[in-house]
Image (cartoon, helix red, strand yellow):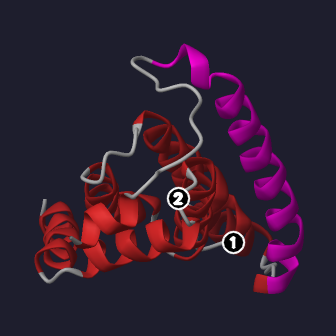
Amino acid sequence: MTFFLRLFASAGTLKYVGVTEQIAKGMIHLAGGGQMFLLNIFTAAICLLTAFMDNVLAVATFIPILSDIEKVGVYIFPFWWAMLFGGTMFGNATVIGSTANIMAMGMLEKESGGHIKFIEWLKPGLVVSTVAIVLAMALLYAQFRFMPNAPFPFLEIETAYENFTG
């Protein structure tokens, strides 16, 4: 219980002090008006965060960012899926990115006394995680026109950054 209280308190604090809004503004600015590019930036960011921290905390941190992105009129339905994919699949890139990976490493050390170095795990972990996320995102792109209330084409944010700052 205390874990979840601290988890959501951390995410709430980031929202309260404006960190999540600044991250959302940065992503929107970097995307330069393209919703597909914004989706890719968002996915890459959650992937990187998830690889180096617990996926629950990463997703809890990104929910307010997604809320801030929605405020400028971005259709966020696919962003929820991208957050799910990045938050679950890319944690396998590192030992510390997934609870299952940590447990597997502990079992390996306990049973055989062996140890896998961070870099030894990272090499195949990045390959597997990258292939998985690229495939998942390709399938997500293929389904855009079937999403509920989806604007099509899902291409441009005309003045998203200006709306967000103004």
Disc 1 or 2, which lies upstream in sequence? 2
Q: Quadrant of residue 104?
A: bottom right
Calculate the distance from the C-alpha at mark 1 to the C-alpha at mark 2: 32 Å
Query: On the rendered structure, is 45 left or right of 65?
Result: right
Picture mark count: 2
Per the image, label 2 sits on a secondary structure element best described as: loop
Q: Position of residue 154 (x, y in %)?
A: 56, 35
Q: At 83% across and 84% down in the image, what residue appears?
A: 119
Provide the residue span drawn in magenta.
119-147
Tell me the kind of residue under disc 2.
Gly
Report which residue position mark 2 lands on.
Answer: 33
Q: At 63% across and 70% down in the image, what residue appears?
A: 106
Relative to 69, say whether 117 is above or below: below
Main secondary structure of the magenta stretch: helix
Per the image, label 1 sits on a secondary structure element best described as: loop
Give the numbered dot on residue 14.
none
Tell me the kind of residue under disc 1.
Thr
Report which residue position mark 1 lands on.
Answer: 94
Relative to 155, say whether 29 is above or below: below
